[in-house]
Every structure is written in structure tokens, then in C-alpha cells.
Image: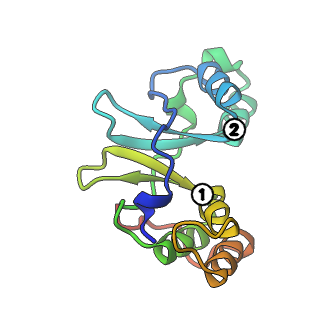
Amino acid sequence: MKVTQLMSKNVTTCAPEDTLREAAGLMLKNDCGSLPVVDEESQVLGMISDRDLCMCSLIEGAPLEGLSVSRAMSKEVWGLHPEDTFADACQALKTHGVRRLPVMDERHHLVGILGIGDLVGPVAKKQKGATQRDLLDALIALTEKPTAVRKKVKA
């Protein structure tokens, strides 16, 4: 299975100049815990999680509406390419200890997002050629600690 078969293509994003309050509102409205941060051309600049915005507000001692996404976002982005395999995705999630990765083309333009649910769901439902071994690999990726120092993966 390829990442392009599994990824979510309808991705909610935010911009670096958005406020943390706006990002939190998007997360709440779309029932997600993180957002890709993109520029006007949908090039991925970073990721922001609900934890990132809470910690930034706490550390800065400022309300969410007084801080920009660029202050809290992770600027080092690990991602996947649409042609990466299921195994590549499981390995990337495991290596970096994250639950979601942006899927980007060769120019780092966002084309989708892939999370643990995207891996486990089709496998559990035995869709798209998924096997029981695939389910086991996805669950291992979810539960194991990161295996490497955080570095970029191919994107």
C-alpha cells in the first residue's frame, strides 16, 4: 500500500501569522490535535499541536490571541511522499514519535496528511490490500518509543 491510498486529502491548515486562538479554534472545529502550517502556496513550513499552543501560552504568560502560530510551531518537519509505502509510514511515525505526518510533493507542497488512524483503520477493516501484519506494524509504530534522534525524513 502507498501513502497516497491511505492519507487524508482534505487537510485543515493554518498560517504562521494566525493567532494561537485561531489555530485552537480550527483544531476544535475539525476534531484534530495538530495542523500543518503552510505559506500562501501550500508549502509546509511547520506543524503545530494542541500541546505546542498550550505550552507556548503558558511559558510566554500571554493569552492565545496574543501569540502567533510562528512562535509555537515546530519548524523541523518530518514528512512523507505520496509514493512512500505503508512500511515507510510506520517507520517514520515510530522513528519520530509522532502520530501524524504531512504528505508533501517534491517541492514540499502539502498534498495530504497521514496519521495512525489512517494506517490502522483500513487494516482493521481489511481494505486496500491490508494484511494482519500491516495492522501489527501500525500498532507497533503507535506504541514504541522513538528510535532515533529527531531528523528529517524524505519529503
- Give the alpha-carbon distance from disc 1 to disc 2, as whole Å: 20 Å
Cβ atoms under marks 1 and 2 closer than 8 Å: no
First in residue order: circle 1 vs circle 2: 2
Q: Is 11 on the left or on the right of 29, as rendered?
A: left
Query: Which mark, residue 50?
Result: 2
Picture coordinates of residue 129, whole percent (x, y):
52, 74
Q: Determine the residue positioned at 44% across, 63% down.
A: 3
Picture coordinates of residue 95, whole percent (x, y):
56, 73
Furthest-left residue in this view? 107
Q: Is 3 on the left or on the right of 20, as rendered?
A: left
In which quarter of the view is residue 19 placed? top right
Disc 1 secondary structure class: helix
Q: Which one is in front in this view, the residue at disc 1 or the one at disc 2?
A: 1
User: Height in image: 23 above or below 94?
Assistant: above
Disc 2 secondary structure class: helix
Which quarter of the rendering shows the C terminus? bottom left
How many residues crowd mark 2 within 10 Å: few (<14), some (14–19), many (20+)?
A: some
Q: Identity of the amino acid at label 1?
A: Asp
Q: Can residue 79 be seen in this snapshot? A: no
Q: Determine the residue positioned at 67% across, 81% down.
A: 132
Count of numbered marks: 2
Q: Can residue 123 be seen in this snapshot? A: yes
Furthest-top residue in this view? 65
In which quarter of the view is residue 52 placed? top right
User: Height in image: 73 above or below 100?
Assistant: above
Q: Nearer the viewer, residue 56 or 135?
A: 135
Q: Identity of the amino acid at label 2?
A: Asp
In which quarter of the view is residue 116 placed? bottom right
- Circle 1 residue: 118
Furthest-bottom residue in this view? 133
Q: Determine the residue positioned at 68% across, 29% down.
A: 60
